[in-house]
Image: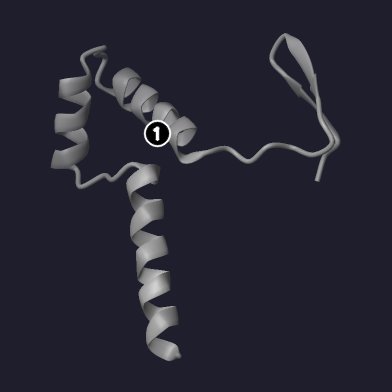
Amino acid sequence: MSFYYYHYHYHCYSLREQPIIATEKDFVINRFFMKLFNTNIMDTVKFYQDQFGFELPSVLIVKRRDKFLARYNSSN
């Protein structure tokens, strides 16, 4: 774990790196789709994500957590 890290044009110092939350990952994925299809319209981005069967990290994390909890609770 890095105690110091550099981010673009400014320094950020912390005791430990903060984990990237799912909504930040969603932003990155959405921006990728915007650049891929050369659009700034979120409805278009969501349409293509749906057509390709692509789920955002925030959705996947919830599904995986629920699946884990179901398995964990059934094992007791």
User: Number of labelled discs?
Assistant: 1
The residue at 33%/41% (across/down) is 56
The residue at 30%/20% (across/down) is 34
Q: Amino acid at mark 1?
A: Asp
Q: Is residue 72 above or below residue 48?
A: below
Quarter of the rendering occupied by the C terminus: bottom left
State which quadrant residue 41 falls in: top left
Q: Secondary structure at mark 1?
A: helix
Colour scheme = one colour
The residue at 34%/27% (across/down) is 30
Please tell me how crowded label 1 is: few (under 14), some (14-19), or many (20+) other residues with Cα within 10 Å: some
In the rendering, at what x and y percent does residue 8 appear? 69, 14
Q: Is residue 75 above or below residue 45?
A: below
On the rendered structure, is 66 left or right of 54? right
Q: Residue furthest top?
A: 9
Q: Residue furthest bottom?
A: 76
Is 26 or 62 nearer to us in this picture? 62
Q: Is residue 52 above or below residue 36?
A: below
In the rendering, at what x and y percent does residue 60 appear? 36, 52
In the rendering, at what x and y percent does residue 55 appear? 28, 45
State which quadrant residue 39 falls in: top left
Residue under circle 1? Answer: 26
Is 17 or 51 nearer to us in this picture? 17
In the rendering, at what x and y percent does residue 14 appear? 81, 30
State which quadrant residue 19 falls in: top right
Q: Is residue 30 above or below residue 62?
A: above
The residue at 46%/35% (across/down) is 25
